[in-house]
Amino acid sequence: MLIGEFHYNIDQKGRLMIPSKFRQRFGLEAIVTKGLENCLFVFPKDEWEKVVEKILKLPLSQANSRAFARLMLAGAYETSIDNQGRILIPEYLRQYAKLTKKVVIVGLYSRIEVWDEKLWEEYKQQSEEQAQDIAEKLSDLGI
């Protein structure tokens, strides 16, 4: 289970430490791709395959489906986890997520998200301010 919030630095080569409590879940490989709200999604390989299966079932005739598939699949990067528990995040993905040196890794059960620290704090503050409205909307879904 991938949960929690962790603060790390990206080194000059674009390598990022995966929290030690997450490494067993990832094994030796991870898939990094463009996420939503200017973050990156990092999936264990088996979870990535589940996401890909769902994407492939989206109707090609719908522009939104094609756009989402392109965002997730064309932007994906397969990386190895080195002996020190780090993954390489390529420059194009660091630029997409506006990652600077300080980042936040957020565990979201089946994936992790990588955020620029400043963007994460802004997003988190905004979400916390809207928590009541969000909760009311989700109550319609039984959550």
Image: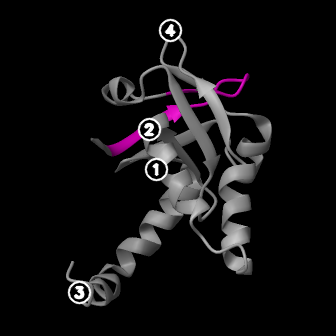
Horizontal relation, residue 135 to residue 76: left or right? left
Residues at marks 3 and 4, CA–CA distance in whole angstroms = 44 Å
**122 or 91, which is in the foreground?**
91
Discs 1/3, front? 1
The answer to if 76 sits in the magenta stretch is: no
Q: Position of residue 13 (x, y in %)?
A: 73, 22
- Tell me which label, 3 or 4, sits earlier in the chain: 4
Mark 3 and mark 4 in contact? Answer it, CB < 8 Å.
Answer: no
Mark 4 and mark 2 in contact? Answer it, CB < 8 Å.
Answer: no
- Tell me which label, 4 or 2, sits earlier in the chain: 2
Residues at marks 1 and 4, CA–CA distance in whole angstroms = 27 Å
Which residue corresponds to mark 2? 46
Query: In the picture shown, does residue 56 fall above or below 140?
Result: above
Which residue corresponds to mark 4? 83
| Magenta residues (range) | 4-17
Which residue corresponds to mark 1? 50
Q: Dot 4: what SS?
A: loop
Mark 1 and mark 2 in contact? Answer it, CB < 8 Å.
Answer: yes
Kindly report the secondary structure that dominates the magenta region of the rendered protein.
strand
Residues at marks 1 and 2, CA–CA distance in whole angstroms = 7 Å
Residues at marks 1 and 3, CA–CA distance in whole angstroms = 27 Å
